[in-house]
Image (cartoon, rainbow, N blue to C red):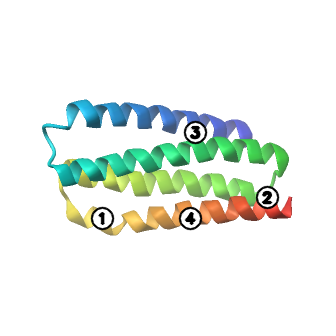
Amino acid sequence: MDKTFFALGAIFAFIAVGAGAFGAHGLKTRLDANMLAIFETAVRYQMYHALALLAVAWAYTRWPGTLVTASGFLFVAGIIVFSGSLYLLSLSGIRWLGAITPLGGLAMLAGWVCLAWAAFRG
């Protein structure tokens, strides 16, 4: 699992850098300030949690088990739901997408709880 989470972290970080550049250069004139801020929030949280996946990969080498694995999968789900819904919202303007964003945030929070719990148990 450590290689899987490390690879996913690297891939999500790569995408975050590309999305950030796209937002800064390609969307600056196409989105209003509010939608651009939403897009930037998606990029920021994706990068934070891409780095968190690298930490999960390291943690798995120290404390392998279901808590660390759950943490990694929760971070992946959080990135997809939280950042994904914000990307779609900012690019499409479909407001109901904002209603699912908190589910991704909850997944991210749960991932941090699982990671902390694994460390305390380890």
Looking at the rendered image, the disc whose residue lies closer to the viewer, 4 or 1, is 4
Question: Distance of mark 4 from mark 3, alpha carbons?
Answer: 18 Å
Element class at badge 2: helix
Looking at the rendered image, the disc whose residue lies closer to the viewer, 2 or 1, is 2
Residue type highlighted by circle 1: Gly
In the rendered image of this protein, does residue 120 appear above or below residue 42? Answer: below
Residue 1, percent from left and from top: 72, 43
Q: Residues within 10 Å of mark 4 (few under 14, many from 20)?
A: some
Element class at badge 4: helix
Task: Return the residue at label 4.
Answer: 109
In the rendered image of this protein, does residue 77 appear above or below residue 60? Answer: below
Residue 97, percent from left and from top: 29, 62
Please tell me which of labels 4 and 3 falls first in the chain.
Answer: 3
Q: Residues within 10 Å of mark 2 (few under 14, many from 20)?
A: some
Residue 85, percent from left and from top: 34, 56
Question: Distance of mark 2 from mark 3, alpha carbons?
Answer: 21 Å
Task: Return the residue at label 3.
Answer: 8
Q: Residue at x 65, y 37 (%)?
A: 6
Element class at badge 3: helix
Please tell me which of labels 4 and 1 falls first in the chain.
Answer: 1
